Amino acid sequence: MSMITIREVSAYVGKEVTIGVWMYNKRSSGKIQFLQLRDGTGTIQGVLVRNQVAPEIWDEAKLLTMESSLYVTGTIRQDDRAPSGFELDVTSVKTIQVAEEYPIAKKEHGTDFLMDHRHLWIRSARQVAILRVRAEIIRAIQVFLDQNGFTLVDPPILTPSSCEGTTDLFHTKYFDEDAYLSQTGQLYAEAAAMALNRVYSFGPTFRAEKSKTRRHLIEFWMIEPEMAFVDHERSLEYQEQMLEFVAQSVLQNCPTELQTLERDISKLEKIKAPFPRITYDEAIELLHREGFEDIQWGEDFGSPHETKIAESFDKPVFITHYPTEIKSFYMKPDPERPEVVLCADLIAPEGYGEIIGGSQRIDDPELLVERYEEHSLSKETYAWYLDLRKYGSVPHSGFGLGLERTVAWICGLDHVRESIPFPRMLNRLYP
RNA sequence: UCCUCAAUAGCUCAAUGGUAGAGCGCCCGACUGUUAAUCGGUAGGUUGCAGGUUCGAGUCCUGCUUGAGGAGCCA
């Protein structure tokens, strides 16, 4: 007799196997019990017929409650009545624990209740599917970057100062010094690119913003590639190729998960490079045509603006060449138009908003020092970053992809809180 | 920080200012193919907190707390 997982049952038809499982539901009549079993790799229905099993096995199964844990032994049988095509004729049940009354019922729950029970909520089929797709997206990104010669470098999480200087940071003590939780690994990735050419960082980032929308988390994960000798245009090509690879990988490797999520596959099949590109100027014109007459050149787009622009395309769209004034200090001005920078935000379709922000970086040390002054950045704190422009400065570009927004988009979620196992949100640190 | 909405049984929600209810879940019982099984029954309440108006407040008013959606900021 073999100890297997539910994922493997198709190879054991007609054989007796034992599986470690949780019971997520039970339907029973007087002389037959249907145990709905899951083990994290899949689900299967266990069938007990009263006059075909030992009385003590029948009685033990009757005591099982929702989410009770057990080893179940039985024979795998092909059955067209089962959604998965297979059933288990149970011959023996070995209870590990009879669970207390499980708080998450089969019917609907409110957001607050589910978030308070996130540690149990992740057991449900939909959440399991999302976490699988998240893992597949991470895997696909790493495969793509590996195939393109990128090296993973891990930036620090405790940092001495703000990297972008704008948003609110989480403050902590670092012995006698002040320290902050990282809001981006980019500046460190730039340093690593000067050592390893093409690199990427992948890790958690933290923003103490009072943001409370479906697109924001306090703690979220970013993938930040940084490329020496690569200009803005080439960077956009990497971005669109990477997202195409991600979408195709999920389509190929997560069909059952996408089915569980009831995701419209045709939307994902359209994610193919190249993506449309419009300049900031053209985006402003588009918005004026669409009735957003309030927005003026030089202002940043709000969410309604981004959504309107995205609705005009059936693929993700790059918005390039934003005004220098509203963008980060390290972005390289367009040599022909210094009032705009060589940057792009990638806006996802279906209202998922900005999922990538990227730019070519300033490589001229004198211009960088000017920017330090304009943005009131401490020369001492950023001395090491200036060094990158003093010792063999090269053109280089990079971008940051927000993992949770990408997962929410690929899965078709209506909130990023379901795209990460344990979301950290405004006023929510538990569980 | 601002705007809008909400808070009643374990959960999801009802209840003209006039006796606090239903469905689901739990528990008990019936049922040999159930797919959120079905059917019958039992138990289950300081209506978020503190005041106020009223003969009478779950309901109206004030303040607070918590949550949800959005703005700003951002990925």
Image (spheres, grey):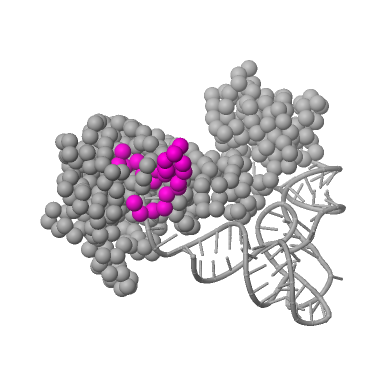
The residue drawn where x is 42% and y is 49% is A169
Give the camera-side residue of A406 and A335.
A335
Give the camera-side residue of A355 and A395.
A395
- Residue at the limit of the structure toward the left, as seen here: A336
The answer to whether residue A282 is left or right of residue B34 is left
Q: Position of residue A1 (x, y in %)?
A: 63, 17
The residue drawn where x is 27% and y is 34% is A192
The residue drawn where x is 39% and y is 51% is A267
Q: Can residue A95 be seen in the rendering of this structure?
A: yes
Q: Can residue A246 be seen in the rendering of this structure?
A: no
Q: Is residue A171 magenta?
A: yes
Residue A247 quadrant: top left
- Residue at the limit of the structure toward the top, as seen here: A1
The residue drawn where x is 80% and y is 31% is A59
Q: Position of residue A347 (x, y in %)?
A: 33, 54
The answer to whether residue A191 is left or right of residue A21 is left
Q: Position of residue A17 (x, y in %)?
A: 63, 22
Q: Which residues are magenta?
A: A165-188
The answer to whether residue B70 is left or right of residue A1 is left
Residue B22 quadrant: bottom right
Q: How many marks?
A: 0
Q: Is residue A375 magenta?
A: no
- Residue at the limit of the structure toward the front, as seen here: A176
Is A223 situated above or below A373? above
Is A58 situated above or below A364? above
Locate the C terminus of chain A by quadrant.
Answer: top right
Is A6 situated above or below A397? above
Q: Position of residue A7 (x, y in %)?
A: 54, 30
